[in-house]
Image: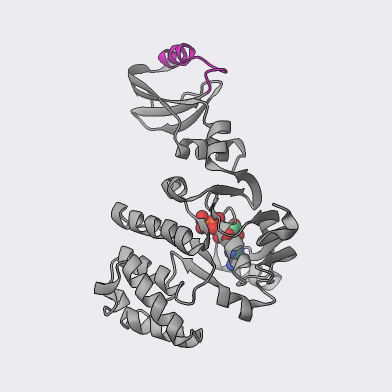
Amino acid sequence: MNRNDAWIRLDGIEKRFKVATRTAGLKEATKALFARKHTIVEALKDISFSIGKGEIVGYIGPNGAGKSTTIKVMSGILVPDEGQCSIMGYNPWKDRTEYVKHIGVVFGQRSQLWWDVPVIDSFELLRDIYAIPEGMYRDNLAMLTEMLDLEAILKMPVRQLSLGQRMRCEIAASLLHSPKLLFLDEPTIGLDAVSKLAVRNFIKRLNREQGVTVILTTHDMSDIEALANRILMIGKGTLLYDGTLDELKERFGTGKTVTVDYRGRSGPVAIEGTTLIEWTDERAVYSFDSEKVTLAEMVTRLSESVEVVDLSVSAKDIDEIIVQLYKEHQI
Ligand SMILES: Nc1ncnc2c1ncn2[C@@H]1O[C@H](COP(=O)(O)OP(=O)(O)OP(=O)(O)O)[C@@H](O)[C@H]1O
């Protein structure tokens, strides 16, 4: 894709936050208030990428990496300090009034629905706020009610809904005005397996049948496996990976994972050529590359420090690849 033709394009986006420094104790806090001590958090550093129409992109990274900040910049909520952003020909923060008519946004941790009124009343309020034409509203409501199985819950007040029911309503609310681009920030957070599956299936169908482009942030790698054709990985405000999940597996997933059950030690045993993924009082999980260290060497090294009770070897799954990547990049 020629970057100039890209549907979504970010170029050198930077965002800094000024945070008041807090010190322990009232006296210190008062002093800091008057002295106006601040530190600068560099939330986004030179972020550039392009996304084409119809893609589903997973935006991943550990806590505090800058995912939500990017989504807020892209949805026009935050103005960056540096850089350019063009989405469907709009500048999200300068053309915000017109731009928001073409995007849908769901923040999994926040609600856009009114707590005490029936869901359908919230939908009607949104229809009025966004001046959605009646025909479009009726068609979309019927389609979303069917696809997200909302019939039985439309008349219930939001506060009575389960988390999974509420999330289905949040997603429907963000799509009533037929946006062509949907931002989902942690859409499956806290959901049970059945609700997660319903949300994922809906996103897939929406993308396939309506051509809606989806950008989603998640900590759940099974969301990524189920949905994303492409991954953007961010750490400490810097973009670290842009590619497909298959490429990621090919590049980083060649190694294997060893799970060791053991007795006789409380602290971790470091083994050269391996990455320690998990360590408890009874179990350790290592990832290793057989070109760097053999299984026999690992067992020998472990047996010097612990009594090995059981050991199993498996191919690395996506969560382990991600943990390894975060470690390699020290994020
Ligand atoms: N309004 C704000 N004021 C000050 N600092 C902020 C603000 N919003 C975000 N930050 C800081 O910017 C950095 C990036 O935050 P952001 O919320 O984008 O991360 P994230 O990748 O979405 O994290 P998580 O997975 O925990 O939601 C963090 O250090 C955060 O503390």
Which quadrant: the C terminus? top right
- Could you tell me residue 322's position as x and y percent? 51, 40
Q: Which residues are magenta?
A: 289-304
Q: Magenta part mainly helix, strand or loop?
A: helix
Task: Say which quarter of the image contains residue 134.
Answer: bottom left
Q: Is residue 210 left or right of residue 18?
A: left
- Ligand number 1: quarter of image: bottom right
Q: Is residue 186 visible?
A: no
What's the colour scheme? one colour
Q: Is residue 323 above or below residue 236?
A: above
Q: Is residue 136 visible?
A: yes
Q: Residue at x 65, y 49 (%)?
A: 239
Q: Is residue 223 above or below residue 34?
A: above
Q: Residue at x 48, y 53 (%)?
A: 218
- Could you tell me residue 132's position as x and y percent? 48, 84
Q: Residue at x 26, y 78 (%)?
A: 156
Task: Say which quarter of the image contains residue 166.
Answer: bottom left
Q: Residue at x 38, y 56 (%)?
A: 201
Q: Is residue 158 above or below residue 22?
A: below
